[in-house]
Structures are given as structure tokens and as C-alpha cells.
Amino acid sequence: MRFDSIIWDLDDDPEGNVQHCAEHGVTKEEVEEVLTNSTDGDTSRSSGRPVSFGDTSTGRHLMIVYEEIDADTVYPVTAYEVPRRKES
């Protein structure tokens, strides 16, 4: 999974995706790093939206919840740090 275009709301929009990620201590740069180099994908159990998992250059393992706009474009809804999933 690799997305080339990521849509962001204004940084100071209190209802926007930048703030939703920041509430979990995740920056736009971290979200972009994971979405452009995702290692795994799934579906969110709570929202039914697609999610991407990946590592940041600082060693954090993040889950990004997003809406797919088209094959190359996504709108991140929120993101947070999660434990690595166990291989089955």
C-alpha cells in the first residue's frame, strides 16, 4: 500500500484531521511517512474505514485511519501509536 497524495485540513482547524492526529501525539510528517511506506493494512473495527500500519524513522509503530479518495489519494482521519501485530 502506497499513497502519493495526502489531503490535509488546515493546521488550526479544531475539527480537522491535523488536530485529530495531534490529539494522539502524531504529527503530519509521521502520518505521511507511514502512508508512503505502509507495511500492512486492514479495516478499523470501530469505524469500518481502511487503516495502514507502519513504522516511523523514530521507531514508532502507527496505525493510520483514512478515507480513500481514489487509487493514489487518501484523507487521513486520525492516527495513533499501536503495538506491532503478531504474525500468525
Image (tube, helix red, strand yellow):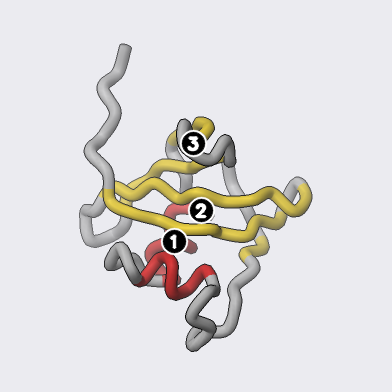
Residue 40, placed above or below residue 13: above
Q: Residue at x 52, y 68 (%)?
A: 17
Q: Residue at x 33, y 54 (%)?
A: 80
Q: Residue furthest right?
A: 70
Q: CA distance from mark 3 to mark 2?
A: 16 Å
Name the N-terminal-most of marks 1 and 3.
Answer: 1
Q: Amino acid at mark 3?
A: Ser
Q: What element does badge 3 sit on?
A: loop
Q: Which mark is residue 31?
A: 1
Q: Position of residue 20 (x, y in %)?
A: 43, 67
Q: Nearer the viewer, mark 3 or mark 2?
A: 3
* Residue in the foreground of this view, choosing between 11 and 55: 11
Relative placement, left or right, of 15 versus 87 is right
Q: Residue at x 34, y 49 (%)?
A: 62
Q: What element does badge 1 sit on?
A: helix
Mark 3: few/some/many CA within 10 Å (<14, 14-19, 20+): some
Q: Nearer the viewer, mark 1 or mark 3?
A: 3
Q: Are marks 1 and 3 in contact (CB under 8 Å)?
A: no
Relative placement, left or right, of 13 versus 56 is right
Q: Residue at x 30, y 18 (%)?
A: 87
Mark 2: few/some/many CA within 10 Å (<14, 14-19, 20+): many
Q: Which mark is residue 35?
A: 2
Q: Amino acid at mark 2?
A: Leu
Residue 54, placed above or below residue 15: above
Q: Amino acid at mark 1?
A: Val
